[in-house]
Amino acid sequence: MSYEVLARKYRPSNFEEVIGQDHVVKALVNSINSEKIHQAFIFSGTRGVGKTTIARILAKCLNCESDSKPTSQPCNSCSNTIEISAGRSVDFLEIDAASNTQVEKMRDLIETVEYKPAKGRYKVYLIDEVHMLSTASFNALLKTLEEPPAHVVFIFATTNPEKIPKTVQSRCLQLNLKTVNENILFDHLKNILDKEKINSDDTSISLIVNSAQGSVRDALTLLDQAIAYGNGILNELDVKKLLGTIDNSLLISMIDNVIEGKGSEVFDLLSQIEELSPAYDVILKDMISILHEVSLHQVLSNSTSPEINNLASKLDKEFCQLLYEIAMNGYTKFNAHPDPKEALEICLLRMLTFNPLQKLGESNKTNTEKKNLKINNTHPKDKPIIDNSKTIETETNNSKLKDNNDWLNFFDSLKISPFARNYYGNMSFMSYTNNELKLMTDDSIGKVPENIESEFLVALKKMLDENIKINYEKGSVVNSPIETNSKKEKEDLAKAHSKIKTNESIQNFVKKFKGSIKEDTIRPLK
């Protein structure tokens, strides 16, 4: 016996079995029960949401022999309903508009309209993908649609209702079918798996539901494939391999590294993801979904995922919206790009380039260089510059932060976000007296956001066990933590280069094999 696919086996046979289209079902049931049946219908909606199925159920309702008049609950046991379900009823004509676009075909159909139904009450014409008809074919239908015989009902099914002429639309009752809600579709698949006695897990079903994008037929087709792939069992690992689904943890790590401004780590993760052979637009689409979840959680605190909570606490709200806009902009232009991989890569590069951490670091680096130049060229009569590298006296002898060296060590030990670190790391220490911390800042840093200042104060209180007040003073920032660390890194790198060049063993090895050392690969020992 031949196998019957799930999409056909579980096709609804009455309105009660239709899922996710309550608004359409209610309108049709009420019109049948009140005996006010329209002469022509347009069922519009995306693929696999029930257009043809509802049309067949409507045809059975009109011609069911269990009652003396049309019924909203067809018996599915009389000859008329059985023949309509099997597709062999002479009073229910299914026509594919895609292969019958010519006006001659439509004229032949119109000639049969005058003949009364052979067995049922109504002769029902279902024209599928009606938007494919030619303009001449639509024009030929107009008069018949406006004044059809009492025994005729037209049903037009289409995925593109906007392509149907307005003259045709005005003569029909249009019902728009929507995509099926994920929860409803999940319950539907779960019910089918129970009936088929197939072992499954909720994660596998959710993956199929997400891939179906609201289409019942797509979901059932994917379910058939997953069952075959898993040899009669549905499990998460097999479904992920079948669908090419990426583990969200990799994408979350990628976004995390974008926030940190770590470009090399971002592209290392992209290489790992590429090993799974996913579509590049799917990667970007999933990143957009993650950023959407993060944005919602920042406002509603509605996510139970620890990864989303972590990103939401680390990511500035404005930067989150910027990342979302960059991703959306890249996704809308994806199909226009000649190379999908390059399209994703340039989108990631934009995220890294417009990262405020990187922009702030570059800005302060430029300003520091300019200020150092001014310091070297200062005339003796000019206002003196405060040198924070010297010990700064405080009013209290038992202060935990006596000088700049104490502050540098203390700042490095603080557990704060990259945003707070970049704001306060570009300020220099002045003094810490009577629970008041004085920091030197300048115009390039700007005003510290309230949420970042609050985070910094909490970190200070945790380390110093005191409520701290911060006093900002405008001036020339010298020997800030970031500047000091940058100088140290350069010094360490210079020492590493020097050691390589003066190491006799290394130089002899290079000379022996006529090789060379790439300057950018030299790193200091940590």
Image: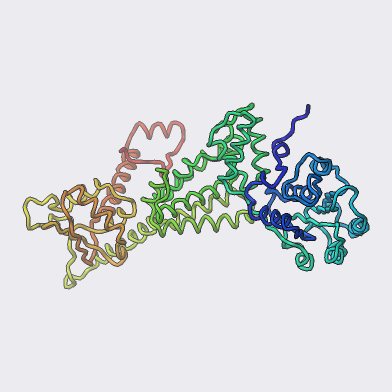
Quarter residue 234 falls in: top right
**Given the current orientation, which residue lies at the most extreme bottom position?**
381
How many numbered marks appear?
0
- Where's residue 291, x and y in %? 47, 52
Residue 188, compared with residue 393, is above or below; it is above
Residue 363 or residue 410, whichever sits in front: 410
Q: What colour scheme has been applied to the protein in the rendered image?
A: rainbow
Residue 198 or residue 357, whichever sits in front: 198
- Where's residue 305, x and y in %? 42, 43
For residue 297, side relative to residue 472 (left or right): right
**Given the current orientation, which residue lies at the most extreme front position?**
68
Residue 293, compared with residue 375, is above or below; it is above
Quarter residue 321 falls in: bottom left
Give me the residue at 43% from left, 31% from top: 512
Quarter of the image that includes the C terminus: top left
Residue 251 or residue 438, whichever sits in front: 251
For residue 19, side relative to residue 347 (left or right): right
Give me the residue at 44% from left, 43% from top: 253
